Amino acid sequence: MSTDTETHLHPAGPPARHRQSMLNKVPEVTVYFWVIKVLCTTVGETAADLLNENLGMGLTNTSYLMAGLLAVALVLQFRARAYRAGLYWLAVVLISVVGTLISDNLTDNLGVPLETTTAVFAVLLALTFGAWYLSERTLSIHTIRTPRREAFYWLAILFTFALGTSAGDLTAERLDLGYWFSAVVFAALIAAVALARFTLDFHTIWAFWIAYVLTRPLGASMGDYLSQPRQDGGLGLGTVGTSILFLAVILGLVLYLVRTKRDVAESGEVSPQEG
């Protein structure tokens, strides 16, 4: 009798909180998240240059190839029933490359000024957030549990990478700040957002997305600084060496997360600031 009562109150299977967390399709925002994200943005910059210039594929062919790979990765991501670290970060690496290529195509192939692309991508990102909120009444990244929310999430991610690419190129090249100083500037801006979040109670969701945008030019500036020739203000490691190095670090961190599950969210609940 006691056993039957316990079974009725606590049905067989994993706890409810665990089942809820497994429905979320994105990782917990931890230090691992931000480290891998910055590394992905660096790879997005160097890998695009590697395929486009070093391997001689050209900007157009590189764009077609990476867009096709991204499409496959996103189909697999959408079909997954829960967050999978390897699949998720593969999609982020690919979308970082595609976001870079979108910006580069507009500026290099079509001659659109960086000031214009930066403004356009900022507007597109704002419109995505607006449509997301009107549709779902939240921008929380802790409740990405439906195809529609996931579609908004990845569209926003794409525009953050494209915006970050244009903004980073604008500061590093047009404003002639240089790669190293640009990285310091964007790192300082991210630190300011974090300070506002933890000391001034700045809105959690907006702090996340602002930092997410800023990590793109930060990672790109780091990649350019490491890969570009010394005469151009870099360290001369080349796109091949830089891409391999950062991909190896990303792979190591993702394998660690797959084993430990340290980035699996504990719950899908939304805090008051995230609603």
Image: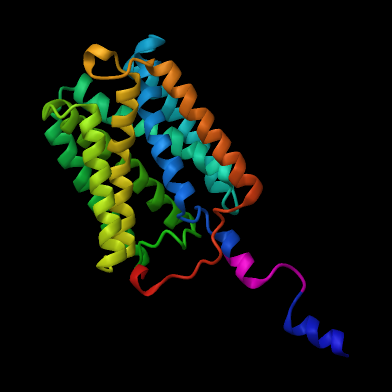
Q: In this view of the protein, which residue sits in the foreground, 41 or 159?
A: 41
Please provide percent x and percent y for residue 41. Answer: 37, 35
Above-or-below relation of 258 to 71: below
User: On the picture, is 20 further left or further right than 275?
Assistant: right
The residue furthest right is 1
Q: Residue 202 lies in magenta, yes or no? A: no
Q: Position of residue 225 (x, y in %)?
A: 30, 24
Question: Can you say whether 190 is above or below 10 in the image?
Answer: above
Quarter of the figure with residue 106: top left
The colour style of the image is rainbow
Residue at 51%, 32% in the rendered image: 249
13 inside magenta stretch? yes
Residue drawn where x is 50% and y is 29% of the image: 247
Quarter that holds the C terminus: bottom left
- Whether residue 85 sits left or right of residue 29 in the image: it is right
> Which residue shows up at 19% across the image and 47% down it?
123
Quadrant holding the N terminus: bottom right
Instruction: Report x, y in % for residue 273.
Output: 34, 71
Residue 61 at least partly seen? no
Expressed as whole percent of the image width and height from the top left, the position of residue 122 reads 20, 45
Given residues 13 and 109, the one toward you in this image is 13
Residue drawn at x 21%, y 32% is 181
Task: Evaluate whether residue 83 shows in this view.
Answer: yes
* Region of the chain picked out in magenta, as a range: 12-20
